Image (spheres, rainbow, N blue to C red):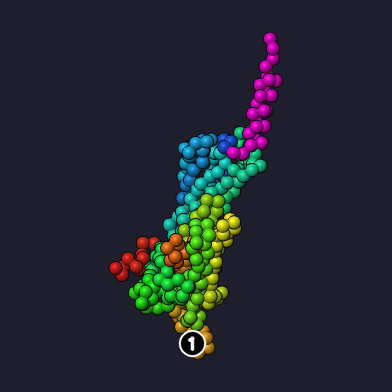
Amino acid sequence: MRNFKPIILFVAMMVLGLATNGYAFQYAKAKVTFKVIDEQGIPVENALIGGAFHYAQPSSPTSKNQKFKGESNKDGLFSVSGKTHGEVAYYVKKDGYYRTFGYYREWFKKGATIKYGKWQPWDPTVEVVLRKVINPVPMYSKQLHTTVPVLGKPVGFDLEKGDWVSPHGSGLVNDFIVTLSGEYRAIKDRNATLRITFDNQGDGIQAYPVPLGPYGNTGSDLRLPHQAPASGYEASWHREKYIKPDGSRKNLGPIEEQNYIFRVRTVLDEKGNIVRANYGKIWGGVQFDVNSEGKGVLLFDYFYNPDGTSNLEHAAGCNLFEKSR
């Protein structure tokens, strides 16, 4: 009788070889160990860790997820395994800390291998940093989507009123002085320039980029620092964008990783030291354009703290705009 063992072994090796040479939608078992620490690198015990191993179907919009949930031990560690095509989505949270969420996708990268039915590297450590909740305070929070009243001329915007300064709105203080200029000729032939300046000494803005991971908005719920920096503010900020008929373009999409911290209503003493100032932050960059009607449009999300401290922690659900209605 013919011995089929060599044939079976050969076929098994061929299957294994195909799996190790490809990476897109190859299914295999995976294991990860989460290590949860605080901002000082100290392990966080009893943090809730949840998520799913993604298990997509090739050429199909549907997917299957192997969900998991558990808690970190005294060393901040939690291990879990499941079947996946190459990625794990996760979140980590604990009372007294801001939630952190993200993806581990090393197996999904080109060149990743499967060995003996397991993704390599096997059992990598994914470090997750939890940021402490220190002192969240009520703030003015607004998703600003507005038309600039005058194109090509400076117009004041009041962050506390959430409106343009009179006579264009109900605002009283020129926190931001906005100048938006440009021209719309066609959808693929337009340009725009935005300038934000500050006429009060000590006021200004600074960029604060934060990487967001492979799928955009990932990381800590507290994206920016607990406290605003004491220095680094610029009294003038500008950006330009355009698209030309030949296809050349500049800066046409939102830069989600870009954020800003600003200081306004600064009061200085005789020696130029700050006596008082109000601080705030802008999430996800600033979008602007000139539309087909020849009007300037401006979009950004901001948080404004009126209490005179540099605190940037916004208390969720405590929007001062809603309380002032």
When the figure is inspected, residue 305 is found, relative to residue 18, above or below; the finding is: below
Number of numbered callouts drawn: 1
Which secondary structure type mostly characterizes the magenta part of the structure? Answer: helix
Residue 78 in view here: yes
Q: Which residues are magenta?
A: 1-24
Q: Residues within 10 Å of mark 1 (few under 14, many from 20)?
A: few
Residue 269: x and y in percent read 48, 87
Residue that lies at the very extreme toward the left in this rendered image: 325
Residue type, numbered disc 1: Asp
Which quarter of the figure has residue 149?
Answer: bottom left
Identify the residue at image location x=65%, y=26%.
Answer: 12
Inspect the magenta stretch and tell me whether residue 15 lies in it.
Answer: yes
Residue 256 in view here: no
Residue 319: x and y in percent read 36, 65
Q: Nearer the viewer, residue 201 or 73?
A: 201
Q: Nearer the viewer, residue 231 or 90?
A: 231
Question: Which residue is identified by label 1?
Answer: 269
Residue 169: x and y in percent read 35, 73
Q: Nearer the viewer, residue 159 or 45?
A: 159
